[in-house]
Protein backbone atom coordinates (compact mmCIF):
# COMPACT_ATOMS: atom_id res chain seq x y z
CA UNK A 1 0.00 0.00 0.00
CA UNK A 2 2.78 2.44 0.94
CA UNK A 3 4.48 1.70 -2.38
CA UNK A 4 1.36 2.65 -4.36
CA UNK A 5 0.79 5.78 -2.26
CA UNK A 6 4.42 6.76 -2.84
CA UNK A 7 4.10 6.37 -6.61
CA UNK A 8 0.96 8.53 -6.68
CA UNK A 9 2.44 11.23 -4.44
CA UNK A 10 5.67 11.41 -6.43
CA UNK A 11 3.77 11.56 -9.74
CA UNK A 12 1.58 14.34 -8.32
CA UNK A 13 4.73 16.17 -7.23
CA UNK A 14 6.08 16.03 -10.78
CA UNK A 15 2.72 17.25 -12.15
CA UNK A 16 2.73 20.16 -9.69
CA UNK A 17 6.30 21.03 -10.75
CA UNK A 18 5.26 21.09 -14.43
CA UNK A 19 2.22 23.25 -13.63
CA UNK A 20 4.43 25.65 -11.68
CA UNK A 21 6.72 25.76 -14.74
CA UNK A 22 3.77 26.96 -16.82
CA UNK A 23 2.73 29.35 -14.06
CA UNK A 24 6.20 30.91 -14.29
CA UNK A 25 5.59 31.66 -17.97
CA UNK A 26 2.10 33.00 -17.24
CA UNK A 27 2.97 35.28 -14.33
CA UNK A 28 5.97 36.91 -16.01
CA UNK A 29 3.99 37.37 -19.24
CA UNK A 30 1.16 39.07 -17.34
CA UNK A 31 3.69 41.18 -15.44
CA UNK A 32 5.06 42.57 -18.71
CA UNK A 33 1.59 43.13 -20.14
CA UNK A 34 1.43 40.27 -22.66
CA UNK A 35 -1.99 38.76 -23.35
CA UNK A 36 -2.45 35.38 -21.62
CA UNK A 37 -5.68 33.65 -22.62
CA UNK A 38 -5.38 30.16 -21.06
CA UNK A 39 -3.74 28.33 -18.17
CA UNK A 40 -4.62 24.66 -17.72
CA UNK A 41 -3.38 21.67 -15.73
CA UNK A 42 -3.55 18.60 -17.97
CA UNK A 43 -4.51 18.05 -21.59
CA UNK A 44 -7.54 16.82 -23.51
CA UNK A 45 -11.20 17.52 -22.66
CA UNK A 46 -11.87 20.23 -20.10
CA UNK A 47 -13.22 18.96 -16.77
CA UNK A 48 -13.59 22.31 -15.03
CA UNK A 49 -12.65 25.91 -15.76
CA UNK A 50 -13.41 29.51 -14.91
CA UNK A 51 -12.48 32.83 -16.42
CA UNK A 52 -10.94 35.73 -14.58
CA UNK A 53 -10.20 38.79 -16.64
CA UNK A 54 -8.91 37.74 -20.05
CA UNK A 55 -7.53 34.38 -18.86
CA UNK A 56 -9.33 31.05 -18.61
CA UNK A 57 -8.05 28.75 -15.85
CA UNK A 58 -8.95 25.09 -15.52
CA UNK A 59 -8.26 21.37 -15.32
CA UNK A 60 -8.28 18.93 -18.22
CA UNK A 61 -8.84 15.18 -18.23
CA UNK A 62 -5.33 13.86 -18.93
CA UNK A 63 -2.91 14.70 -16.07
CA UNK A 64 0.23 14.59 -18.20
CA UNK A 65 1.43 18.16 -17.64
CA UNK A 66 -0.01 21.58 -18.26
CA UNK A 67 0.10 24.51 -20.65
CA UNK A 68 -0.26 28.27 -20.88
CA UNK A 69 -1.45 30.19 -23.94
CA UNK A 70 0.40 33.48 -24.50
CA UNK A 71 -0.87 35.27 -27.60
CA UNK A 72 1.71 35.83 -30.32
CA UNK A 73 4.61 33.62 -29.29
CA UNK A 74 5.61 33.85 -32.98
CA UNK A 75 4.86 36.55 -35.61
CA UNK A 76 3.26 33.86 -37.77
CA UNK A 77 0.64 32.93 -35.16
CA UNK A 78 -2.75 33.33 -36.82
CA UNK A 79 -5.12 32.01 -34.14
CA UNK A 80 -7.98 34.48 -33.60
CA UNK A 81 -8.48 35.63 -30.02
CA UNK A 82 -12.27 35.74 -29.46
CA UNK A 83 -11.86 38.47 -26.84
CA UNK A 84 -10.17 40.92 -29.22
CA UNK A 85 -11.07 39.57 -32.65
CA UNK A 86 -7.40 39.82 -33.61
CA UNK A 87 -4.88 37.17 -34.54
CA UNK A 88 -1.69 36.66 -32.63
CA UNK A 89 0.14 38.46 -35.43
CA UNK A 90 -2.07 41.57 -35.13
CA UNK A 91 -2.63 41.87 -31.39
CA UNK A 92 -0.70 44.90 -30.02
CA UNK A 93 -0.01 42.89 -26.84
CA UNK A 94 1.29 39.86 -28.74
CA UNK A 95 4.40 38.41 -27.18
CA UNK A 96 6.57 38.78 -30.28
CA UNK A 97 6.14 42.58 -30.17
CA UNK A 98 7.86 42.91 -26.79
CA UNK A 99 11.60 43.59 -26.32
CA UNK A 100 13.78 40.52 -26.57
CA UNK A 101 14.92 40.73 -22.94
CA UNK A 102 11.31 40.56 -21.74
CA UNK A 103 10.57 37.57 -23.98
CA UNK A 104 13.73 35.91 -22.67
CA UNK A 105 12.57 36.29 -19.08
CA UNK A 106 9.13 34.92 -19.91
CA UNK A 107 10.48 31.90 -21.81
CA UNK A 108 13.14 31.10 -19.21
CA UNK A 109 10.73 31.54 -16.26
CA UNK A 110 9.64 27.90 -16.52
CA UNK A 111 13.17 26.60 -16.10
CA UNK A 112 13.88 29.15 -13.38
CA UNK A 113 10.86 27.75 -11.52
CA UNK A 114 12.34 24.24 -11.75
CA UNK A 115 15.68 25.54 -10.46
CA UNK A 116 13.92 27.28 -7.56
CA UNK A 117 12.08 24.06 -6.70
CA UNK A 118 15.34 22.08 -6.79
CA UNK A 119 17.17 24.59 -4.57
CA UNK A 120 14.29 24.78 -2.10
CA UNK A 121 14.01 20.99 -1.90
CA UNK A 122 17.74 20.60 -1.30
CA UNK A 123 17.74 23.36 1.31
CA UNK A 124 14.93 21.63 3.21
CA UNK A 125 16.86 18.34 2.92
CA UNK A 126 20.14 19.69 4.29
CA UNK A 127 18.64 22.08 6.84
CA UNK A 128 15.90 19.99 8.44
CA UNK A 129 15.45 16.44 7.08
CA UNK A 130 19.13 15.53 7.18
CA UNK A 131 21.32 13.22 5.16
CA UNK A 132 23.29 10.10 6.08
CA UNK A 133 26.34 11.23 8.03
CA UNK A 134 29.19 11.52 5.48
CA UNK A 135 31.61 10.57 8.26
CA UNK A 136 30.00 7.11 8.41
CA UNK A 137 31.98 4.85 6.06
CA UNK A 138 30.29 2.17 4.00
CA UNK A 139 32.12 -0.58 5.86
CA UNK A 140 30.38 0.65 9.04
CA UNK A 141 26.92 0.17 7.54
CA UNK A 142 24.75 -2.60 8.99
CA UNK A 143 24.35 -5.54 6.62
CA UNK A 144 20.89 -4.77 5.28
CA UNK A 145 20.22 -6.89 2.21
CA UNK A 146 19.56 -5.04 -1.03
CA UNK A 147 19.23 -6.69 -4.45
CA UNK A 148 19.98 -10.44 -4.32
CA UNK A 149 22.09 -12.00 -7.08
CA UNK A 150 20.88 -15.35 -8.38
CA UNK A 151 24.40 -16.55 -9.19
CA UNK A 152 28.06 -15.80 -8.43
CA UNK A 153 30.91 -15.07 -10.83
CA UNK A 154 34.01 -16.65 -9.33
CA UNK A 155 36.21 -14.62 -11.70
CA UNK A 156 35.95 -10.81 -11.80
CA UNK A 157 35.63 -9.35 -15.30
CA UNK A 158 34.92 -5.88 -16.65
CA UNK A 159 31.90 -5.42 -18.91
CA UNK A 160 32.40 -2.55 -21.40
CA UNK A 161 28.66 -2.46 -22.14
CA UNK A 162 27.49 -1.75 -18.59
CA UNK A 163 30.83 -0.18 -17.58
CA UNK A 164 30.78 -2.34 -14.47
CA UNK A 165 31.56 -5.88 -13.35
CA UNK A 166 30.41 -8.53 -15.82
CA UNK A 167 27.18 -10.18 -14.69
CA UNK A 168 27.20 -13.85 -13.81
CA UNK A 169 25.63 -16.46 -16.09
CA UNK A 170 22.95 -18.52 -14.27
CA UNK A 171 23.47 -21.37 -16.74
CA UNK A 172 27.18 -21.70 -15.97
CA UNK A 173 27.97 -20.00 -12.66
CA UNK A 174 27.06 -21.38 -9.22
CA UNK A 175 23.87 -20.27 -7.50
CA UNK A 176 24.57 -17.57 -4.95
CA UNK A 177 24.46 -18.42 -1.24
CA UNK A 178 21.92 -15.62 -0.74
CA UNK A 179 19.57 -17.15 -3.30
CA UNK A 180 20.02 -20.61 -1.76
CA UNK A 181 19.16 -19.24 1.66
CA UNK A 182 16.15 -17.35 0.32
CA UNK A 183 17.36 -13.95 1.50
CA UNK A 184 15.16 -11.01 0.53
CA UNK A 185 15.73 -7.25 0.28
CA UNK A 186 15.33 -5.71 3.71
CA UNK A 187 16.71 -8.71 5.65
CA UNK A 188 19.37 -7.84 8.22
CA UNK A 189 22.34 -10.25 8.44
CA UNK A 190 23.14 -10.95 12.11
CA UNK A 191 25.90 -13.57 12.07
CA UNK A 192 27.97 -15.89 9.88
CA UNK A 193 29.42 -19.13 11.25
CA UNK A 194 28.43 -18.03 14.75
CA UNK A 195 30.33 -14.74 14.51
CA UNK A 196 28.30 -11.52 14.87
CA UNK A 197 28.50 -9.23 11.82
CA UNK A 198 27.26 -5.81 12.97
CA UNK A 199 28.62 -4.07 9.89
CA UNK A 200 29.66 -4.80 6.32
CA UNK A 201 33.36 -4.56 7.15
CA UNK A 202 33.06 -7.39 9.65
CA UNK A 203 31.02 -9.46 7.18
CA UNK A 204 33.70 -8.99 4.54
CA UNK A 205 36.45 -10.22 6.82
CA UNK A 206 34.39 -13.16 8.08
CA UNK A 207 33.57 -14.30 4.53
CA UNK A 208 37.30 -14.34 3.79
CA UNK A 209 37.76 -16.93 6.56
CA UNK A 210 34.98 -19.34 5.55
CA UNK A 211 35.49 -19.79 1.81
CA UNK A 212 34.57 -23.26 0.55
CA UNK A 213 33.05 -24.06 3.96
CA UNK A 214 29.43 -24.80 4.87
CA UNK A 215 28.41 -22.30 7.53
CA UNK A 216 25.34 -21.14 9.39
CA UNK A 217 23.94 -17.72 8.47
CA UNK A 218 21.48 -15.91 10.74
CA UNK A 219 19.34 -12.94 9.77
CA UNK A 220 16.22 -11.08 10.87
CA UNK A 221 13.15 -10.34 8.77
CA UNK A 222 10.25 -8.24 10.07
CA UNK A 223 11.44 -8.76 13.63
CA UNK A 224 11.76 -12.55 13.30
CA UNK A 225 15.09 -14.40 13.52
CA UNK A 226 15.79 -16.86 10.71
CA UNK A 227 18.78 -19.05 9.86
CA UNK A 228 20.12 -21.54 7.34
CA UNK A 229 23.31 -23.27 6.24
CA UNK A 230 25.08 -22.76 2.95
CA UNK A 231 28.48 -23.22 1.34
CA UNK A 232 30.41 -19.98 0.72
CA UNK A 233 32.23 -20.11 -2.67
CA UNK A 234 35.66 -18.57 -3.13
CA UNK A 235 35.66 -15.81 -5.73
CA UNK A 236 37.65 -12.84 -6.96
CA UNK A 237 36.44 -9.61 -5.43
CA UNK A 238 37.60 -6.01 -5.20
CA UNK A 239 39.85 -5.09 -2.29
CA UNK A 240 38.31 -2.99 0.47
CA UNK A 241 40.94 -0.24 0.25
CA UNK A 242 40.41 0.41 -3.45
CA UNK A 243 40.60 4.20 -4.13
CA UNK A 244 37.16 5.72 -4.71
CA UNK A 245 38.49 7.55 -7.77
CA UNK A 246 39.35 4.30 -9.57
CA UNK A 247 36.79 3.31 -12.21
CA UNK A 248 35.89 -0.29 -13.07
CA UNK A 249 37.74 -0.17 -16.40
CA UNK A 250 40.95 0.65 -14.51
CA UNK A 251 40.83 -2.45 -12.30
CA UNK A 252 43.95 -4.63 -12.49
CA UNK A 253 44.87 -7.96 -10.92
CA UNK A 254 46.48 -6.08 -8.04
CA UNK A 255 43.11 -4.59 -7.11
CA UNK A 256 41.55 -8.03 -6.60
CA UNK A 257 41.63 -10.55 -3.76
CA UNK A 258 40.24 -13.99 -3.01
CA UNK A 259 37.30 -14.09 -0.64
CA UNK A 260 33.81 -15.37 -0.05
CA UNK A 261 30.66 -13.83 -1.49
CA UNK A 262 27.05 -14.08 -0.35
CA UNK A 263 25.63 -12.59 -3.51
CA UNK A 264 23.98 -9.50 -2.03
CA UNK A 265 24.25 -5.75 -2.41
CA UNK A 266 24.12 -3.96 0.90
CA UNK A 267 21.36 -1.34 0.98
CA UNK A 268 20.85 0.00 4.50
CA UNK A 269 17.70 1.89 5.33
CA UNK A 270 18.12 5.52 6.25
CA UNK A 271 17.12 4.60 9.80
CA UNK A 272 20.15 2.27 9.94
CA UNK A 273 22.65 5.10 9.39
CA UNK A 274 23.29 8.14 11.61
CA UNK A 275 21.94 11.31 10.02
CA UNK A 276 23.14 14.89 10.20
CA UNK A 277 21.36 18.15 9.38
CA UNK A 278 23.07 21.52 9.07
CA UNK A 279 20.47 24.13 10.00
CA UNK A 280 19.02 26.85 7.76
CA UNK A 281 22.23 28.90 7.42
CA UNK A 282 24.85 26.23 6.71
CA UNK A 283 22.17 24.41 4.71
CA UNK A 284 22.42 27.17 2.08
CA UNK A 285 26.11 26.43 1.49
CA UNK A 286 25.47 22.68 1.30
CA UNK A 287 22.61 23.28 -1.12
CA UNK A 288 24.69 25.21 -3.63
CA UNK A 289 27.59 22.75 -3.33
CA UNK A 290 25.46 19.71 -4.14
CA UNK A 291 23.51 21.64 -6.79
CA UNK A 292 26.70 22.27 -8.76
CA UNK A 293 27.56 18.57 -8.50
CA UNK A 294 24.07 17.62 -9.72
CA UNK A 295 24.33 20.04 -12.66
CA UNK A 296 27.62 18.41 -13.73
CA UNK A 297 26.02 14.97 -13.46
CA UNK A 298 23.00 16.13 -15.46
CA UNK A 299 25.17 17.29 -18.38
CA UNK A 300 27.14 14.04 -18.17
CA UNK A 301 23.88 12.09 -18.38
CA UNK A 302 22.87 14.03 -21.53
CA UNK A 303 26.18 13.06 -23.12
CA UNK A 304 25.73 9.38 -22.22
CA UNK A 305 22.16 9.03 -23.52
CA UNK A 306 23.03 7.89 -27.09
CA UNK A 307 25.13 4.97 -25.89
CA UNK A 308 22.42 3.96 -23.39
CA UNK A 309 19.66 3.67 -26.01
CA UNK A 310 20.75 0.17 -27.21
CA UNK A 311 20.56 -1.04 -23.61
CA UNK A 312 16.96 0.21 -23.43
CA UNK A 313 16.09 -1.97 -26.43
CA UNK A 314 17.79 -4.95 -24.77
CA UNK A 315 15.90 -4.34 -21.53
CA UNK A 316 12.58 -4.23 -23.39
CA UNK A 317 13.32 -7.62 -24.94
CA UNK A 318 14.19 -9.31 -21.67
CA UNK A 319 17.87 -8.65 -20.91
CA UNK A 320 18.87 -7.40 -17.48
CA UNK A 321 18.07 -3.69 -17.14
CA UNK A 322 21.15 -1.53 -16.82
CA UNK A 323 20.48 0.65 -13.74
CA UNK A 324 22.27 3.52 -15.49
CA UNK A 325 19.80 3.64 -18.40
CA UNK A 326 17.46 6.67 -18.56
CA UNK A 327 14.03 6.48 -16.97
CA UNK A 328 10.75 8.16 -17.83
CA UNK A 329 8.42 9.90 -15.41
CA UNK A 330 6.87 6.44 -14.96
CA UNK A 331 10.18 4.94 -13.87
CA UNK A 332 11.05 7.91 -11.65
CA UNK A 333 7.66 7.68 -9.94
CA UNK A 334 8.16 3.97 -9.36
CA UNK A 335 11.54 4.59 -7.74
CA UNK A 336 9.95 7.38 -5.72
CA UNK A 337 7.32 4.88 -4.55
CA UNK A 338 10.00 2.46 -3.37
CA UNK A 339 11.85 5.22 -1.51
CA UNK A 340 8.58 6.30 0.12
CA UNK A 341 7.92 2.70 1.17
CA UNK A 342 11.41 2.47 2.69
CA UNK A 343 11.02 5.82 4.43
CA UNK A 344 14.17 7.08 2.71
CA UNK A 345 13.17 10.74 2.71
CA UNK A 346 16.68 11.98 1.94
CA UNK A 347 16.93 10.00 -1.30
CA UNK A 348 13.32 10.85 -2.19
CA UNK A 349 13.95 14.59 -1.90
CA UNK A 350 17.24 14.28 -3.75
CA UNK A 351 15.50 12.46 -6.60
CA UNK A 352 12.82 15.16 -6.82
CA UNK A 353 15.46 17.92 -6.85
CA UNK A 354 17.50 16.10 -9.50
CA UNK A 355 14.45 15.72 -11.76
CA UNK A 356 13.68 19.43 -11.49
CA UNK A 357 17.25 20.31 -12.41
CA UNK A 358 17.01 17.96 -15.38
CA UNK A 359 13.72 19.49 -16.57
CA UNK A 360 15.04 23.02 -16.12
CA UNK A 361 18.27 22.44 -18.02
CA UNK A 362 16.63 20.38 -20.77
CA UNK A 363 14.01 23.06 -21.45
CA UNK A 364 16.76 25.61 -22.09
CA UNK A 365 18.30 23.61 -24.94
CA UNK A 366 18.34 25.92 -28.02
CA UNK A 367 16.03 23.69 -30.06
CA UNK A 368 12.34 24.05 -30.87
CA UNK A 369 9.90 23.24 -29.36
CA UNK A 370 11.81 23.73 -26.08
CA UNK A 371 11.77 27.13 -24.40
CA UNK A 372 15.45 27.52 -25.21
CA UNK A 373 14.62 27.30 -28.92
CA UNK A 374 12.32 30.33 -28.68
CA UNK A 375 14.96 32.23 -26.69
CA UNK A 376 17.66 31.40 -29.26
CA UNK A 377 15.48 32.60 -32.15
CA UNK A 378 14.60 35.83 -30.33
CA UNK A 379 18.27 36.68 -29.81
CA UNK A 380 19.17 35.61 -33.34
CA UNK A 381 16.56 38.07 -34.66
CA UNK A 382 17.94 40.82 -32.43
CA UNK A 383 21.54 40.27 -33.49
CA UNK A 384 20.58 39.99 -37.16
CA UNK A 385 18.70 43.29 -36.98
CA UNK A 386 21.63 44.93 -35.20
CA UNK A 387 24.13 43.80 -37.84
CA UNK A 388 21.79 44.94 -40.62
CA UNK A 389 21.52 48.40 -39.03
CA UNK A 390 25.31 48.65 -38.69
CA UNK A 391 25.71 47.78 -42.37
CA UNK A 392 23.03 50.25 -43.42
CA UNK A 393 20.74 47.52 -44.66
CA UNK A 394 16.99 47.18 -44.00
CA UNK A 395 15.82 45.12 -41.04
CA UNK A 396 15.47 41.50 -42.27
CA UNK A 397 12.45 41.08 -40.00
CA UNK A 398 11.39 38.17 -37.91
CA UNK A 399 12.26 34.50 -38.41
CA UNK A 400 9.63 32.49 -40.27
CA UNK A 401 8.73 29.64 -37.93
CA UNK A 402 7.03 27.75 -40.75
CA UNK A 403 10.44 27.24 -42.39
CA UNK A 404 11.70 25.71 -39.15
CA UNK A 405 8.79 23.27 -38.97
CA UNK A 406 10.73 20.28 -40.39
CA UNK A 407 13.46 20.69 -37.75
CA UNK A 408 10.87 21.14 -35.02
CA UNK A 409 8.99 18.02 -36.13
CA UNK A 410 12.27 16.10 -36.27
CA UNK A 411 13.10 17.05 -32.67
CA UNK A 412 9.57 16.16 -31.55
CA UNK A 413 9.86 12.81 -33.35
CA UNK A 414 13.19 11.95 -31.70
CA UNK A 415 11.89 12.96 -28.27
CA UNK A 416 8.70 10.98 -28.85
CA UNK A 417 10.61 7.81 -29.74
CA UNK A 418 12.88 8.27 -26.73
CA UNK A 419 9.93 8.76 -24.37
CA UNK A 420 8.21 5.69 -25.83
CA UNK A 421 11.37 3.62 -25.28
CA UNK A 422 11.84 4.69 -21.67
CA UNK A 423 8.17 4.32 -20.76
CA UNK A 424 8.04 0.85 -22.33
CA UNK A 425 11.21 -0.24 -20.53
CA UNK A 426 9.87 1.17 -17.26
CA UNK A 427 6.73 -0.92 -17.62
CA UNK A 428 8.16 -4.23 -18.84
CA UNK A 429 11.57 -4.19 -17.14
CA UNK A 430 11.72 -1.41 -14.53
CA UNK A 431 14.72 -0.31 -12.53
CA UNK A 432 13.99 -1.32 -8.96
CA UNK A 433 15.74 -0.75 -5.66
CA UNK A 434 14.59 -4.23 -4.60
Image (cartoon, helix red, strand yellow):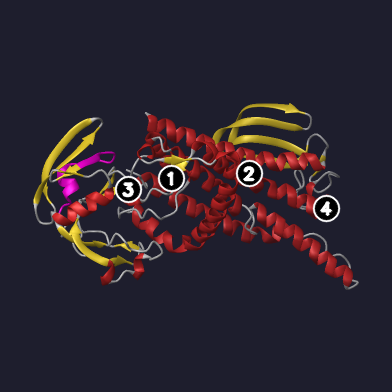
Q: Residue furthest right?
A: 392
| Residue 114 in picture, x, y percent from top left | 61, 45
Stretch in magenta:
175-190
Q: Earlier in the sequence, mark 4 or mark 2?
A: 4
Q: Real-space Cα distance between discs 1 and 3?
A: 11 Å
Q: Say if 339 sits above or below 320 in the image.
A: above
Q: Dots 1 and 2: beta carbons under 8 Å? A: no
Query: Which image quarter is the C terminus in?
Result: top left
Q: Residues within 10 Å of mark 3 (few under 14, many from 20)?
A: few
Q: Is residue 282 left or right of residue 132?
A: right
The answer to whether residue 112 is magenta is no
Asked if the residue under mark 2 is in contact with the one under mark 4, i.e. CB atoms within 8 Å, the reply is: no
Asked whether the beta carbons under mark 3 and mark 2 sit within 8 Å of each other, the answer is no
1 vs 2, front mark: 1
Q: CA distance from mark 1 to mark 2?
A: 26 Å
Q: At 41% across and 55% down in the image, what residue appears?
A: 325
Per the image, the residue denoted by label 3 is 140
Residue at the disc numbered 2:
116
Residue with the mark numbered 1 = 133
- Residue at which label 4 appears: 99
Q: How far apart, in angstroms, are the residues tagged by discs 3 and 2? A: 35 Å
Query: What is the C-alpha distance between the residues marked 3 and 4?
Result: 59 Å
Amino acid sequence: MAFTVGIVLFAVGILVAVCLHEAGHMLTAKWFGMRVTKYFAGFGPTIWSFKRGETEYGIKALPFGGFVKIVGMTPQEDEIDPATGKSGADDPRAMWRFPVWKRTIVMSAGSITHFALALTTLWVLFSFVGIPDPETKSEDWPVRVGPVAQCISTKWEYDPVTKGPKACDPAKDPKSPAAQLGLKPGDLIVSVDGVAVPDSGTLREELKKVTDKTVAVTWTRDGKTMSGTVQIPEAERLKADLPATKTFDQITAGDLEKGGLLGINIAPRTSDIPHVSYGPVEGVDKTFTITWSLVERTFASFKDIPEKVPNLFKAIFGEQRDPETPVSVVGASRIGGELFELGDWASLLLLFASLNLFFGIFNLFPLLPMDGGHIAIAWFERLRSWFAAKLGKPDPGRVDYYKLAPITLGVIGILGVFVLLTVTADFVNPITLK
